[in-house]
Image (spheres, rainbow, N blue to C red):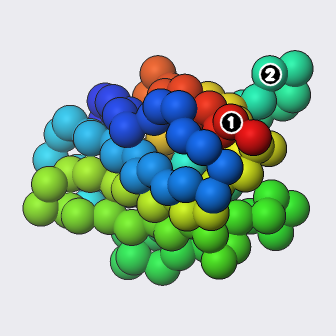
Amino acid sequence: QVQLVESGGGLVQAGGSLRLSCAASGRTFSTYNMAWFRQAPGKEREFVAKITDRRMPYYSASVSVKGRFTISRDNAKNTVYLQMNSLKFEDTAVYYCAGQGPGSREYDSWGQGTQVTVSS
């Protein structure tokens, strides 16, 4: 497993932007698929986006983030990012970074989360 620490959350007005970062410990980060999830108050945690070890991005089909959010990674910095543009009130949530190790069927490493609040 890797240790994950998110940062970059905060309060932003609707239409604004934020970039979340997730710093990972360990030497095997480059072999991990990495993802962002989010959980709004009173709702279940939901998948937002992931990026594979080969840098292929995927975005949730049920969460309307495609075209607004961009996931990326910098293996030299052991960091994965989520650039969020045109933020909406409904994007308000705690955002979690997660890692899926080689051969793992689940995300087995999780960060503590970072709060994103979008004011309308």
Amino acid type, callout 1: Ser
List x then y, in percent, for residue 112: 47, 21
List x then y, in percent, for residue 16: 55, 54
Residue drawn 20% across the image and 36% down it: 25
* Residues marked 1 and 2 touching at CB (< 8 Å): no
In the rendered image, the quadrant that contains the C terminus is top right
List x then y, in percent, for residue 82: 46, 56
Q: Which residue is mark 1?
A: 119
Q: Secondary structure at mark 1?
A: strand
User: Would you place residue 22 above or below residue 51 in this image?
Assistant: above
Residue drawn 54% across the image and 40% down it: 12
Q: CA distance from mark 1 to mark 2?
A: 15 Å
For residue 115, side relative to residue 23 (left or right):
right
Amino acid type, callout 2: Pro
In the rendered image, the quadrant that contains the N terminus is top left
Viewer-proximal residue, 87 or 62? 87
Q: Which residue is mark 2?
A: 41
User: Would you place residue 8 above or below residue 71 in this image?
Assistant: above
Residue drawn 35% across the image and 46% down it: 21
- State which tag comes first along the sequence, 1 or 2: 2
Q: Quadrant of residue 3?
A: top left
Residue drawn 39% across the image and 67% down it: 72
Circle 1 or circle 2, nearest the eye = 1
List x then y, in percent, for residue 91: 71, 45
Q: Quadrant of residue 76?
A: bottom left
Visible residue check, residue 107? no
